Image: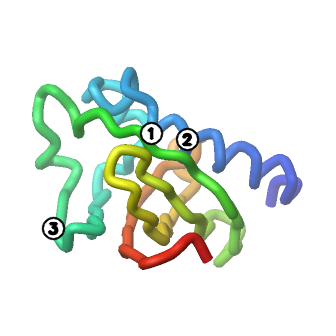
Amino acid sequence: MENNNFLKEHLRKLEEMLLRPEIRNSPTELRNILADNFFEIGSSGKILHKDGIAPEGIGVVNMQLSEFEIHPLSDEIILTTYRIFNKETQQYTLRSSIWKYMENRWQMVFHQGTKTDSST
């Protein structure tokens, strides 16, 4: 497995990319990051599959990521956990993603957001 510090920083950058408007509004960019079998259980409770992404992308957000950690499940599979603060709604969510190394790059295969009442 890659050096854990390097891997942690790399996966954090990928997660942060998914918060940027130019990535979220680009189905091409999203296809590069999300695995073909990707699905998400959003903090709203809605389930989204990669093939359900609209032509205009997944919408712009104003969010800040913190408390990022990685939890290796195998050499090719990593669970990431972190906290998001939505600056527009003033809502915190706990987030988790599963990343898999395939086709010579890390791809997100699963993501979940869970609302929480506080920043702790």
Nearer-the-camera pick, 87 or 14: 87
Residue in the image at 34% along x and 35% along y: 30
User: Circle 3 sits on which residue?
Assistant: 46
Q: Amino acid at mark 1?
A: Leu
Residue 21 is left or right of residue 80, and the answer is: left
Residue in the image at 27% along x and 26% along y: 25
Q: CA distance from mark 2 to mark 3?
A: 21 Å
**Residue 57, placed above or below residue 91:** above
User: Circle 2 sits on which residue?
Assistant: 16
State which tag comes first along the sequence, 2 or 3: 2
Q: Residues within 10 Å of mark 1 (few under 14, many from 20)?
A: some
Residue 57 is left or right of residue 95, and the answer is: left
Residue 48 is left or right of residue 41, and the answer is: left
Residue in the image at 19% along x and 73% along y: 45
Q: Amino acid at mark 2?
A: Glu
Q: Amino acid at mark 3?
A: Lys
Q: Provide residue 42's location: percent of width, then percent of height.
A: 27, 65
Q: Secondary structure at mark 1?
A: loop
Q: Are marks 1 and 2 in contact (CB under 8 Å)?
A: yes
Q: CA distance from mark 1 to mark 2?
A: 5 Å
Nearer-the-camera pick, 89 or 110: 89
Colour mapping used in the image: rainbow
User: Circle 1 sits on which residue?
Assistant: 19
Q: Provide residue 103's location: percent of width, then percent of height.
A: 51, 43
